[in-house]
Amino acid sequence: MAPNTRSSSTGTRTTITTMTAWPRKARRTSPGGELRELINDLNVDEAAELIALAWVGRGDYDASEWADAVTAARERANKRTAKYLLGMPLLADLLEEGLEAIGA
């Protein structure tokens, strides 16, 4: 949406960004915005594996239970995967630990 333009009493023009344009811009520039888009673009299998990886890193599953973790993650699949993952404290550490646990 293009910004609204208003004239002041002195004749100069002021550009004001409308509130409806703000959320889209904020999603692109906010911390985690690009990661959120990346996660949202994953297919069901990829999203399930990413969730399972975080669960293994968190200790919910052992590396030997990888298939069970992926199955459980696939069962919880919904459109809020990015919100779920980005809401995990220390997500990057969990993913790193998960990768180490499965030997990747």
Image (cartoon, helix red, strand yellow):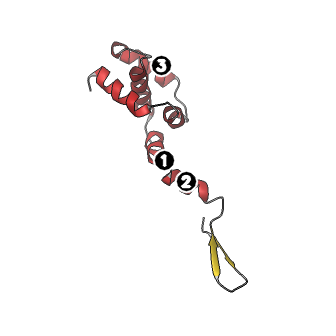
Q: Residue at x 44, y 27 (%)?
A: 51
Q: CA distance from mark 3 to mark 2?
A: 33 Å
Q: CA distance from mark 3 to mark 1?
A: 26 Å
The three-letter code of the residue at mark 1 reads Gly
Q: Residue at x 48, y 41 (%)?
A: 40
Q: Residue at x 39, y 20 (%)?
A: 56
* Element at label 3: helix
Residue 26 location, x and y as percent? 55, 54
Which residue is farthest right? 9
Kindly check if marks 2 and 1 are in contact, taking CB atoms under 8 A apart as contact: yes
Q: Residue at x 38, y 17 (%)?
A: 67
Residue 87 location, x and y as percent? 53, 33
* Element at label 2: helix
According to the picture, the residue beneath numbered tag 1 turns out to be 33
According to the picture, the residue beneath numbered tag 2 turns out to be 26
Mark 2 is surrounded, within 10 Å at the Cα level, by few (under 14), some (14 to 19) or many (20 or more) other residues, namely: few
Which label was assigned to residue 72? 3
Q: Of the residues under marks 2 and 1, which one precedes in the sequence?
A: 2
Up-down: is 11 above or below 4? below
